[in-house]
Image (spheres, rainbow, N blue to C red):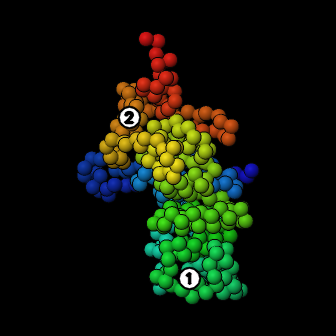
Amino acid sequence: MTQLLEIENLSVRFRTTSPLRALMERNPDPFIDAVCDVSFSLQEGETYALVGESGSGKTTLARAIIGLNPASSGSIRFEGEEITGWNDRQMAPVRRRMSMMFQDPVGSLSPRQTVRNLITEPYRIHDVPLKNVDAEAHRLLELVGLAPEFADRYPHQLSGGQARRVGVARALALNPRLILADEPTAGLDVSVQGEILNVLARLQRELNLTILIITHNLNVVRHISDRMAIMYLGRFVETGPTQRIFDRPRHPYTEALLSANPTPDPESRSARIVLSGEIPSLMNRPSGCEFHPRCPYARDLCAAQTPELAAEKVASGVRRYSCHFPLEEARPGSQAEELADPS
């Protein structure tokens, strides 16, 4: 399988104050780290999910990949080519081969343009001539299951599901190899969510698309993704094959997210783990393991030392996690801990 995208030790920083104010306040580091030392890769034709609470850095990471947020360090390679630090002119041909679906299905569409103009706009942006605009608009609408007459409608005449399909159609213009989908089912009814996910899955098979999906909806992740990464305060705390992580989470944050995921099977429901406190500020990161103030299993070591990123080989790939006391090894009160305790 061909490796399409490779991210290595990527970090993204944002300035918090102006250089002059930082000088006056004697602040030597007027920045916050929104994404910290992230590494992963995407294989051609797979779906990779970024999961985490709001503010965890998922969208910032995706925007860095497409060149909308500058990386402060690390490497981004797309189709074998290093694109880190490229300006808009250099990124223009790359953006023809990767496309981003933004979160708000209606707000991301200009209310003054017809669907025809919206879904063919990428051709005009990238100066790609079209022999027949109507024919291309109808082709794109057909791909996402909309009739040709939708080409003459305006965004306010669309339902949420229809607007999302238009967003998918727009993303498919120029035949990209990579789709970055930011919350593709946000604000939609459950039945409509399923329809959109089925459309994406079908298009992936038909067009051999690679999809990076950004979401907090774990049902979406389980339905569509091959591998996933759990983000917390801009870092990956657990990555690996999706089914393996759902079946056996190793990081307490992953366990808490999964426990809050609704399931229709009453017999499979587990007690919800309620995390204490709020997500810490990026301007005041906790010491050691940054999750320790909210972790129900935290010990003294967790506050004092940052855990290494451990790797674990599984049948479906490699799973990585960052925890001093991974679940099912030495959870307080567990059988594993009792056996490890000589007293």
Pointer 2 local density, CA inside 10 Å: few below 14, some 14–19, many at least 20: some
| Residue identifier under label 1 | 115
> Could you tell me which secondary element the residue under label 2 belongs to?
loop
Label 2 or label 1, whichever lies nearer to me, is: 2
Residue 258 located left or right of residue 28: right
Residue most toward the top?
343
Task: Please state the total of marks drawn on the protein image.
Answer: 2
Displayed quadrant of residue 92: bottom right
Image coordinates of residue 55 in percent, x first then y, are 40, 53
User: Which numbered dot is residue 86?
Assistant: none
Residue appearing at x 41%, y 54% in the figure: 54
Image coordinates of residue 87 in percent, x first then y, are 55, 64
Residue appearing at x 35%, y 47% in the figure: 279
Query: For this rendering, which residue is in front, 160 or 128?
Result: 160
Residue appearing at x 56%, y 43% in the figure: 246
Image coordinates of residue 43 in percent, x first then y, are 68, 52
Residue appearing at x 53%, y 72% in the figure: 161
Image coordinates of residue 149 in percent, x first then y, are 61, 87
Residue 73 located left or right of residue 133: left
Residue most toward the right?
1
Query: For this rendering, which residue is in front, 49 or 246?
Result: 246
Mark with earlier residue (2, 1): 1
User: Which numbered dot is residue 296?
Assistant: 2
User: Does residue 37 appear in this view?
Assistant: no
